[in-house]
Image: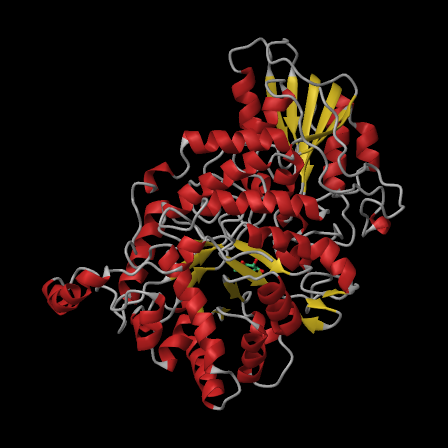
Amino acid sequence: MAGPRAATARRSRPLLSACSATAGALLLPFMVAAAPTAAAAPRCDSTEDCLAQMTLEEKAGQMTQVNHTDVMDDTDAVAEYGLGSLLSGGGAGPDGDAGGTAAEWADMYDDYQRAAMQSRLGIPLIYGVDAVHGHNNVEGATVFPHNIGLGATRNPELVRRAQNVTRHEVLGTGIDWNFAPAVSVPRDDRWGRTYEGFGEVPRLARTMGSASITGLQGHDLDSESVAATAKHYVADGGTAWGTGEGDYAIDQGDARMSERELRRIHLRPYRAAVRADVASVMVSFSSWDGLKIHQHEYLVDDVLKGELGYDGVVISDWAGVRQVEGGSYAEKLRASINAGLDMIMVPDDYEQNIDAIVGEVRAGRISEERIDDAVRRILDLKFDQELFDKPFTDRSYTGDVGSAEHRAVAREAVAQSQVLLKNDDVLPLSPDSGKDIVVGGKTADDLGYQMGGWSISWQGSGGDTTEGTTLWEAVQRETDGTDTEARFVGTDTGQDFSGDVGIWVGGETPYAEGIGDDGDLALSEADSEQLGDICAKTDVCIAMLVSGRPMIINEELETADAFVASWLPGTEGAGMTDVLFGHERFHGRLPVTWPSSVDQEPINRGDGQNPLFRLGYGLRH
Ligand code: GLC
């Protein structure tokens, strides 16, 4: 049975020591009156003190999380309704659109915090964001390889260091809650969220997930922590093709498996996350044998909170309550809260959410005890993170967002994530060999493609959407000042050119979630043609596949003399040339089984099928 999060952290620290409480109470009205521009001070100083003073409406407000774009034009609503949390859904920057600098995000956070603390009890907000591969919403932030690439490193300490950089950069924008790591165990590579998992076996989700939680939270929750979120509970990576929600083929679908398989493969990463004191758990949109996890009392209340002893915050996914079976919103919400959900990511109609909670409690269909338990978990987290004492951005972190030191960690992660699948005596290259290099392919000089989804915007996009180094820029830096000529042909590989070495970079264009569900996993005709051109016009050629998952590459593998699985590297393309030019050895090993045909999906270790490459494969040089 996992013990509670660090015992000392669980008891909320009284804001004022008992002896000074009276003095504080006498001063408080004066302080607030005397400094109206300063943020109002909280008017409760421990979880139990706040709970004792809160009305049912205020408790319902604490359980309500709203996308900031729904209150950006009416920030008074934050205090008026006593909202417990705001979030920035993918791409919801300070102006409501994608992007924004770290300073702009920090200003936004502080403005909302000041608004929140104008509420009757002055309880501070906790603000959530998806910093799933670095602080990927923020312009200029360090963007790491997506989790599938981190899984290929097999290096939990490096993952912890990477997440510690992310912690630093998230704190630089004031934000205190990260909806990461995904500890999904993707079993069907056709799933659009395969790249958000560390790999197809629970061991990778356990080791890398725990390392991520420690990197984000530190060893004890405090004001230097960013609260981590293990997601999406449970078996989000085990759904069946064809059962997806709405237009999705598999995402948010139905996991049809025995409880034994669910526990053996998908539950184990959560045991590890609870042991790592993860601050929150996000439930999955998906179902188990036809019942939505958002309303699954056995899995959420009995197993997660009971059997695993989880005492942190359980949060819904984005409007996940609305997918719950049932009639009215209030009925769906009742099912979710009674199943064990504590915070509701509405994320828009906060009045409906609050009214529904109040109505269901008054009707006796949700108990006061259940509400108090949910609010207690939320307030405990806020006190553990010292939000009552230090509610605003610590600007000493802001200037480090995207620093050279942070990017060096990402570059190391990129290098260690590269998996060498084929090498007919081509690699490593020598930058001063005097050989002419030709670089092409749609991804060779496209930072947006190199980062993939969840990058500046929710779905990601092509182009220079932030600061970073593309593969082509990295090749230029390698060869500038040497006898080696480097030439860029881009996608115009039909033109006349020749060279000693060709490098092709292609693969998937960015996507996120179910929009990325793909029944083919095939390279585009243009990709294949461009690779073929480059290989036909150079003496030896190297293929670098930038994708969020395995693709069907049988022919291309034959065409190229060397083949690298690069995954979704992020902003630091120099990590790719570090291994191409031998500054670092190839280290990566496949975190997934690589199919020889999409008809083999789902394909996983030990299922008796004959893959193109097995889990763990990776050449050295
Ligand atoms: C999304 C995702 C979840 C994310 C949340 C907030 O739909 O399922 O991973 O944390 O909404 O953006």
Looking at the image, residue 184 lies above or below residue 348: above
Image coordinates of residue 567 in percent, x first then y, are 65, 39
Q: Is 89 left, or right, of 285 in this rendering?
A: left
Residue 247: x and y in percent read 69, 66
Q: Which residue is drawn at 56% across and 55% down?
A: 274
| Camera sees residue 540 | yes
- Quadrant location of the C terminus? top right
- Work out which quarter of the rendered image holds the N terminus and state it: bottom right
Determine whether, in the image, residue 508 is placed left or right of residue 42.
right
Picture quarter containing residue 368?
Answer: bottom left
Relative horizontal placement of residue 23, taking residue 160 as reference (left or right): left
Report the front residue among 532 and 593: 593
Ligand 1 location (quadrant): bottom right
Count of numbered tags: 0
Image spot of residue 410 (x, y percent): 52, 34
Query: Which of the colour schemes (rainbow, by chain, secondary structure, one colour) is used?
Result: secondary structure
Please identify the quarter of the rendering in which residue 472 is found. Answer: top right
Vertical order, 468 against 184 (above or below): above
Of 404 and 456, nearer the camera is: 404
Compare residues 183 and 143 and report the one nearer the observer.
Answer: 183
Quadrant in the picture for residue 376: bottom left
| Residue 497 appears in the rendering | no
Residue at screen point 62% across, 49% down: 196
- Residue at 37% x, 80% y is 57
Decide: is 85 above or below 507. below
User: Left or right: 235 with respect to 334?
Assistant: right
